[in-house]
Amino acid sequence: MLTVEPWVGFIMGCRFATDGEKEMSNGQNGAEQRLVTPGMAIGPSDGVRVGSGALAHNDTIIATRLGWVREINNTVSVDPINSAYMPRSGDLIVATVAEVRNNLWFMNINGPFQGLLPMSLAPWKVEFGAARQHMGIGDVVLARVQEVDECHNVVLTMKGVGLRRLNQGSVHSVPINHIDRLRGEGNAMLQRLRDASDCRIIIGENGKVWIDGDADGMAWARKAVALVQSSGHKSTFEAEFSALEKTTQKKGDA
């Protein structure tokens, strides 16, 4: 059984980092990320590109929002602490049925707009008026965003490899800005989570994570996801995660 858990005007008053604060972090070398507030100086702008959430002023990169400093591929940006999911065509998401009509389902996609799943894009042959026979309110599915039009109508599809109703496991919510941290470079962190827990884990672009496995594996996976969320930006994270890995025993180890 599946369960579901629940800027301008800052430059003149910008604050520069004190001696005790971290230098600008580098997402490629594992340095601890620094939390900055709007108007705070992040570091020199010479030789780097300025990404979202920041601007260059008098040879200094200034934060324009509250968030974590990140430097990847010589681009410095500030990731917001909280951000909303904005669907894009092709996104793989975990969605929940919110309402059923004769010929379509309205889906909660964890965003500002509901998703629409017409019966023509369902994985079954659905007769008009028989949508409820296939899915009801509260059912959870793995789907893709088919298209997003200029009126913000989000059309979903369940026609595709692996797209299906999720009947077992549990669904957990994570902040959108933590998704990359959960996956890791080249999905390395996601694979470690799967290997250590012996669970099937799918991370939706909409901040919903589906976990399915035995009770012990799922409990460990929930702890690991929470650790990545709370400490993934810290320099001590690798040691903490390795210690957590040692608390589980994969099948076949004995």
Image (tube, rainbow, N blue to C red):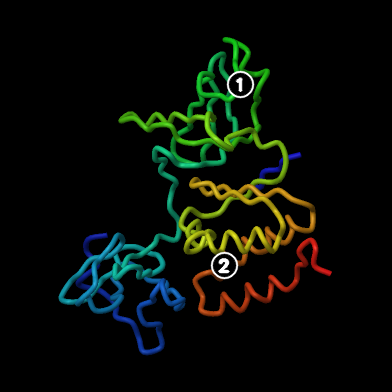
Farthest residue toward the top?
128
What is the quadrant of residue 29 in the picture? bottom left
Name which residue lies at 15% across and 75% down.
Answer: 58
Packing grade of label 2 (10 A; few <14, some 14-19, many >=20) is: few
Residue 163 placement (x, y as % from top left) = 57, 35
Farthest residue toward the right?
254
User: What quarter of the picture does the C terminus occupy?
Assistant: bottom right
Question: Could you tell whether 248 is left or right of 82 in the image?
Answer: right
Q: Is residue 233 visible?
A: yes
Residue bearing mark 2: 230
Name which residue lies at 51% across and 19% down.
Answer: 120
Name which residue lies at 63% across and 61% down.
Answer: 193
Q: Is residue 204 above or below residue 165?
A: below
User: What quarter of the picture does the N terminus occupy?
Assistant: top right
Q: Mark 2 belongs to which amino acid?
A: Ser
Residue bearing mark 1: 124
Q: Is residue 239 above or below residue 205?
A: below
Which badge, 1 or 2, is on the more N-terminal residue?
1
Residue 43 placement (x, y as % from top left) = 28, 78
Residue at disc 2, secondary structure: helix
Farthest residue toward the bottom?
19
Pair 1/2: label in front? 1
Residue 77 placement (x, y as % from top left) = 32, 65
Residue 190 placement (x, y as % from top left) = 58, 59
